[in-house]
Image (tube, rainbow, N blue to C red):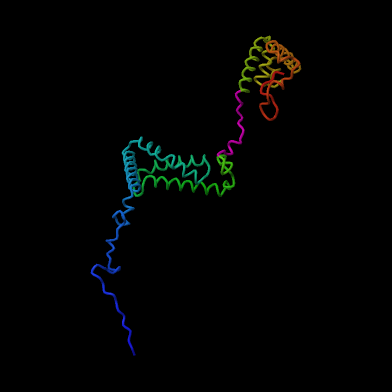
């Protein structure tokens, strides 16, 4: 039976099998091994230097505080307050709770900083305290169904910066109303000075001190009917004086048209009638 022989091409003096190529000879276009790039990345090296500098500064602040320098802890709070608040607010979604937990974090840190051994960074240590306190707060209110409520700090929508607080009307008067009320109060005070003493006295007891008719009667030594009639005459005289100084307060005008209601109930902010 004929046999088949396999002939191999002879190796040239300059050829080398692929498997025999040393791995150390493989180089990147820059001439450095691929794995050396990460170690020589300028950005990573800069971050490492910054982190090392921050850790050294934190260690120095801890050393100063443990040596009795109280101002060192104030520097720690200044460095990390915003970061801790950001962590707690992200966990609790409530500004008031986040501020309280942030404060409690630094209280715990102040008490335990003497036992801080530097096994982790100061930032990590504070972060762990804040997270634990925030989790405890969350589960405390979760068991009381507070998670079903919404904070006034929650945004109205994903694409809107306004919060529910913006929907709550302020009870403070606007500047125009405050100015008008102040001018009217000054005018009434000037007219009150022009009233006869007994009318000024009884209006002060009724309108300014809000005394009931019975107390006024006992104070002045008159009966309740006399109190009511004297108050009516005093108010009429006061309105006459007001009309003399400002025609818009004429006797035929209604006090309800002078001012806007101060409250939804319709009561006037000031009234002399």
Q: Residue furthest left?
A: 13
In front here: 180 or 16? 16
Residue 118 higher or lower than 168, as above or below: below
- The residue lying at 37 percent from left, 37 percent from top is 75
Could you tell me if residue 255 is visible in this image? Answer: yes
- The residue lying at 23 percent from left, 69 percent from top is 13
Residue 65 higher or lower than 257, as above or below: below
Instruction: Point out residue 139 in the picture as x, y percentages from the top left corner.
Output: 52, 49
Stretch in magenta: 161-175
Position of 160 with respect to 75 (left or right) is right
- Of the 4 image quadrants, the one containing the N terminus is bottom left
- The residue lying at 76 percent from left, 16 percent from top is 252
In front here: 62 or 83? 83
Residue 94 higher or lower than 186, as above or below: below
In front here: 110 or 148? 148
Residue 248 higher or lower than 54, as above or below: above
Instruction: Point out residue 180 in the picture as x, y percentages from the top left corner.
Output: 63, 20
- Of the 4 image quadrants, the one containing the C terminus is top right
In front here: 134 or 28? 28
- The residue lying at 59 percent from left, 45 percent from top is 149
Instruction: Point out residue 77 in the picture as x, y percentages from the top left corner.
Output: 40, 38
Position of 254 with respect to 140 (left or right) is right
Residue 11 is covered by the magenta coloring: no
Residue 166 is covered by the magenta coloring: yes
Instruction: Say which quarter of the image contains residue 73.
Output: top left
Instruction: Point out residue 191 in the picture as x, y percentages from the top left corner.
Output: 66, 12
């Amino acid at each position: 039976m004929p046999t088949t022989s396999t002939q191999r091409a002879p190796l040239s003096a300059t050829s080398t099998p692929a498997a025999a190529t040393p791995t150390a000879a493989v180089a990147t276009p820059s001439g450095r091994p691929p794995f050396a790039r990460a170690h020589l990345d300028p950005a990573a090296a800069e971050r490492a230097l910054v982190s090392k500098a921050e850790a050294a500064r934190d260690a120095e602040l801890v050393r100063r505080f443990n040596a009795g320098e109280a101002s060192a802890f104030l520097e720690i709070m200044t460095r990390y307050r915003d970061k801790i608040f950001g962590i707690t607010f992200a966990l609790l979604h409530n500004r008031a709770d986040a501020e309280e937990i942030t404060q409690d974090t630094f209280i715990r840190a102040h008490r335990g900083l003497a036992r801080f051994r530097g096994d982790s960074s100061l930032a990590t240590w504070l972060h762990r305290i804040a997270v634990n306190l925030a989790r405890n707060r969350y589960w405390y209110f979760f068991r009381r169904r507070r998670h079903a409520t919404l904070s006034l700090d929650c945004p109205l929508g994903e694409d809107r910066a306004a919060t529910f607080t913006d929907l709550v009307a302020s009870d403070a008067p606007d500047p125009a109303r405050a100015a008008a009320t102040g001018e009217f109060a000054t005018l009434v005070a000037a007219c009150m000075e022009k009233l006869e003493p007994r009318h000024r006295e009884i209006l002060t007891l009724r309108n300014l001190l809000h005394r009931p008719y019975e107390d006024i009667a006992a104070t002045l030594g008159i009966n309740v009917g006399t109190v009511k009639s004297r108050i009516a005459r005093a108010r009429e005289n006061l309105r006459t004086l007001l009309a003399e100084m400002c025609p818009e307060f004429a006797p035929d005008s209604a006090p309800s048209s002078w001012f806007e209601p101060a409250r939804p109930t319709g009561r006037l902010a000031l009234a002399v009638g």
